[in-house]
Amino acid sequence: MNRLMIRWQQKCGVALYWLTWPGLWLYLYSSQRTRVLVVCGQQVLLVKTWLGDGKWSLPGGGLHKREDSRQGARRELLEETSLDMPVDSFKLVDHRQANNHGLVFAYDLFVIEAVTPLPVRRQPFEIVDLGWYDYRQLTDEQLAPDARAALRTWFKK
């Protein structure tokens, strides 16, 4: 997909995000979610979702009914980035709560440490952009609050 089409798709997604915000608030309020921080040295894997605020975030999403958090993180990573990682490579870092523009939700943060940046492919109906980025070159304004918090926690060690 060319860059112009991606920008158009993202602008539509941002507008729809704000229009559907009250419904998203109700949906996310009681949901359990996951986020996956995939790191390779100073590089991190980030995604931009179609329906969102246009900021870089970590792969992840909601759990299915009675789904184990680690299995859900694995499924979401595969669906969004095409990375098929063994379930034992997902290290639970923390149980957290996020507040993205008043959308509050609980999530489990997992980390995968890769030796080399793994090849990724975006899921076209959910993800508008993804890639490996040097965390030192990312600004706070470019990152969703939960991604910013995870990067600060991980890279301060």
Image (spheres, grey):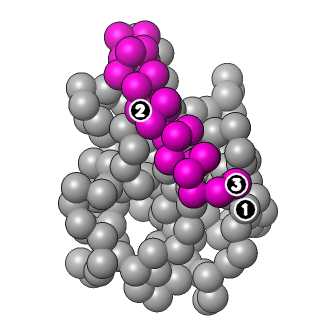
Which amino acid does the dot numbered 1 rest on?
Answer: Arg
| Residue at the extreme front | 4
Which amino acid does the dot numbered 2 rest on?
Answer: Val
On the picture, is 60 further left or further right than 14?
right
Disc 2, SS? helix
Mark 3, other Cα within 10 Å: few <14 / some 14–19 / many ≥20: few
Which amino acid does the dot numbered 3 rest on?
Answer: Met
Please give the residue where the numbered disc 3 appears in the rendered image.
1
Q: Quadrant of residue 149?
A: bottom left
The quadrant the N terminus occupies is: bottom right
Disc 1, SS? loop
Tell me where residue 70 appears, x and y as whole percent. Answer: 63, 50
Q: Residue at x 57, y 57 (%)?
A: 3
Tell me where residue 63 appears, x and y as whole percent. Answer: 61, 33
Please give the residue where the numbered disc 2 appears in the rendered image.
14
On the picture, is 9 further left or further right than 122?
left
Please give the residue where the numbered disc 1 appears in the rendered image.
121
Rendered position, 80 above or below 155? above
